[in-house]
Amino acid sequence: MPAKPVVAATDGSDASLRAVEWAAREAVLRGAPLRIVSATAEPPRMTGGHDVSGYDTVGDILTQNRDRALSAGADRAAKTAPGLLIDADQLTGAPAEAVTASGSGALMLVVGSRGMGEFAAMVLGSVSRYAATHASCPVVVVRETAEAERRQVGIGIADPQTSAPALEFAFEEAALRKAGLVAVHAWHMPDADVSRAGNEFTASGRDRIQAAATARLEELLGDWRAKYPDVTVSHEVVHGHAGRALAGLSGRADLVVLGRHHAHHGPASVLQAVLSHAYGPIATVPSA
């Protein structure tokens, strides 16, 4: 494939096939090819010293399941986007690492939120979480998708100093979808800090914090408005837990974009909260 592809991972489950559909539509929006991947970690052969010729090993069965998943994914993508250039690749090795590595050099990596069956659900859940926090490219975790387009892309802004990659991704998505963009910054003072602040944390104090955060957000968005004049931009500064605010935002947006640092830098509680409780697709974009 000469152009950078959109990569979608599948295990044949309904959730992963919804992710393939989402990825196919995204590839059409971006004029990009679609690469569908599936990984299987083969366990050791458990023969117990007996002759098992003529019987499939566990590894054989898992490999067959992987191949069926790829076929089902390619069929679903072709029906979703007729004429789209589609490639399907088998991955080897541990699923989390193999799927995450498959996004190297891609426009984005798209994964479902859970897999097929109890054990597979646990495995794919760990795969999607690992990819969303470790991949070198943007990762979209597709949960439920709305029946009708909402024509809105959301973005969570935590640190303006590291938000440029996520903002670029979000504005590009909004422009491609002819959608509006809403930027949300949530601030929260823990109860212990409020107690220490005492009377200083009054209504007027909250108003000052709110006003200062709003001014910073407006300044940050100014240059991006100039770069994307056709995108209608709004912003919200809310007092509350960021994870709760952004999960709520996902209920009224087609996509919510979050920036992320390298997995070993800083806490990821907000990201994990949003991934766990979101109502729709969530994109995580590496900060560098």
Image (cartoon, rainbow, N blue to C red):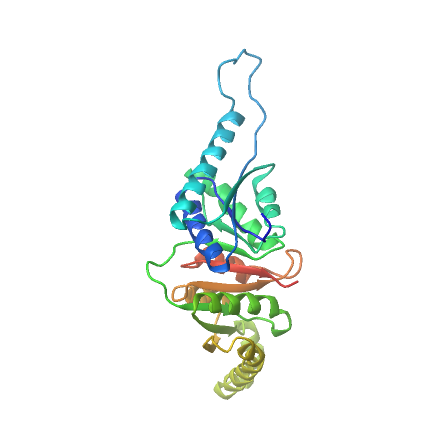
Q: Residue at x 56, y 81 (%)?
A: 222
Number of marks present in the image shown? 0
Q: Is residue 173 left or right of residue 288?
A: left
Q: Is residue 146 left or right of residue 193?
A: left
Where does the C terminus fall, quadrant-wise? Answer: bottom right
Using the rendered view, name the quadrant where residue 74 is placed.
Answer: top left
Looking at the picture, tell me which residue is in the foreground, 267 or 30.
30
Looking at the picture, tell me which residue is in the foreground, 194 or 79.
79
Task: Give the image location of residue 106, x and y in percent.
Answer: 59, 53
**Residue that sits furthest to the bottom in the current view:** 204
Q: Residue at x 55, y 80 (%)?
A: 226
Task: Give the image location of residue 76, x and y in percent.
Answer: 40, 44
Task: Give the image location of residue 218, x and y in percent.
Answer: 54, 82
**Residue that sits furthest to the top in the current view:** 51
Q: Is residue 23 left or right of residue 102?
A: left
Task: Give the image location of residue 250, x and y in percent.
Answer: 42, 64
Q: Residue at x 57, y 56 (%)?
A: 107
Q: Residue at x 52, y 54 (%)?
A: 32
198 above or below 148?
below
